[in-house]
Amino acid sequence: MSEKFLDKVIVDSPGRINIIGEHTDYNLGYVLPAAIDKRIRFTLERNDTDSRCEIRSKGYEKALFVDLKHIAPSTTQWENYILGVLYEIGKRTNKLKGFQCSIESDLPVGSGVSSSAALECGLAFGLNKLFDLGLSKHEIVVLSRDAEHNFVGTKCGIMDQFASVMSKKDHVIFLDCKSMEYTHVPFNINPYKLVLLNSNVSHNLAGSEYNTRRKECEEGVAILHTKYPSVASLRDATLEMIETCKTDMSPEVLDRFTFVVEENDRVLAAVEALGKDDLKTLGNLMYQTHEGLHYLYEVSCPELDFLVDYTKNLKEVLGARLMGGGFGGCTINLIHEDAAEVFIKEVSIAYEKKFKLKLTSFEGHSSAGTTLL
Ligand code: GLA
């Protein structure tokens, strides 16, 4: 046994919230996410075999057995996050060996707080430590994103994995997804707080429509590029350029483009507002994002619209919007701390009455990224 290797590591890998900047990451724009204090915990141990791995997740009776020499996608979706990470690590290094892994989580699945990125990044981070693989944090982020593309099939952007690994307590990450430059912006919203309302719906459109949006954007950018060769992604486009392509694109694609260009501007405005402690402006921007996601990007659903609309006449709520890819999951609400308890109680009753569904809630505290315990 090499001295260099640890025998056992325990890693906490958090979910994330996103203050603003939705569907901008794969369009190489700006995002403003943060890790939260809900996480997946991995306990990883070397088992001194060359390639045999056993992964157990609390709540799932069946263990996943993997031979590192023969990794192929599974028909069980959660297994693909694991398999994808092992496969992507194998493409980058041959130092990975057999291990035992047990997983437990307090992250709600399918609620838009990216339990998937937490799963991918936590496993990659832990194995990197256990076997001294020499992967940088940036490589862990990228390989986790690649795992999701190649094994899970969601053509996601980089935001979730980046936030899960790179976050800093009491800060949000202002990330430029084109240059990958980032800054940790102090996040002090006292006496307000972030409340997440989990609609507990996850419409099965989520995966397919997500990929469709991405494809629509890429095809539209190709058209823009023929007219404006300097435009390589939506990040380089302006509303004026888009206006001149009106006859070349479908109204849907024009709407998607308008949303993304405006959303990038909103992220910049949000960072400025945070710098001035101007939470009212931040809240207004969040409402505008929701409108755009509903009317232009068309990724909302009745449950999320209801939850956002409910807040509009409450002066204690400065802003609310759907968070993440859409079609279900959570809304994020910027609310005065004194009003949070009553708000949650009342909106839960109204939601349950309307949709015959339970609403669950939790607070979003910006926290550190993936951590070795
Ligand atoms: C999902 C994806 C992210 C991002 C958001 C929407 O969470 O994983 O990459 O595109 O949707 O902003």
Image: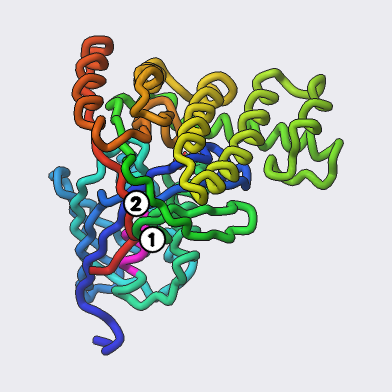
Q: Is residue 9 above or below residue 2?
A: above
Q: Quadrant of the C terminus?
A: bottom left
Look at 36% across and 33% down and name the residue there. Answer: 333
Is residue 86 among the parts visible in the rendering? no
User: Distance of mark 2 from mark 1, alpha carbons?
Assistant: 8 Å
Which stretch did the figure color magenta? 116-127
Look at 33% across and 61% down and name the residue there. Answer: 370
Q: Secondary structure at mark 2?
A: strand
Which residue in the structure is indicated by mark 1? Answer: 168
Three-letter amino acid code of the residue under disc 1? Lys
Image x and y of residue 239, in percent: 74, 31
Q: Inspect the magenta stretch and tell me whether residue 120 lies in it.
A: yes
Which residue in the structure is indicated by mark 2? Answer: 366
Three-letter amino acid code of the residue under disc 2? Ser
Sort mark 1 into few (<14), some (14-19) or many (20+) by Cα contacts within 10 Å: many
Report the side of 318 relative to 119 (left or right): right
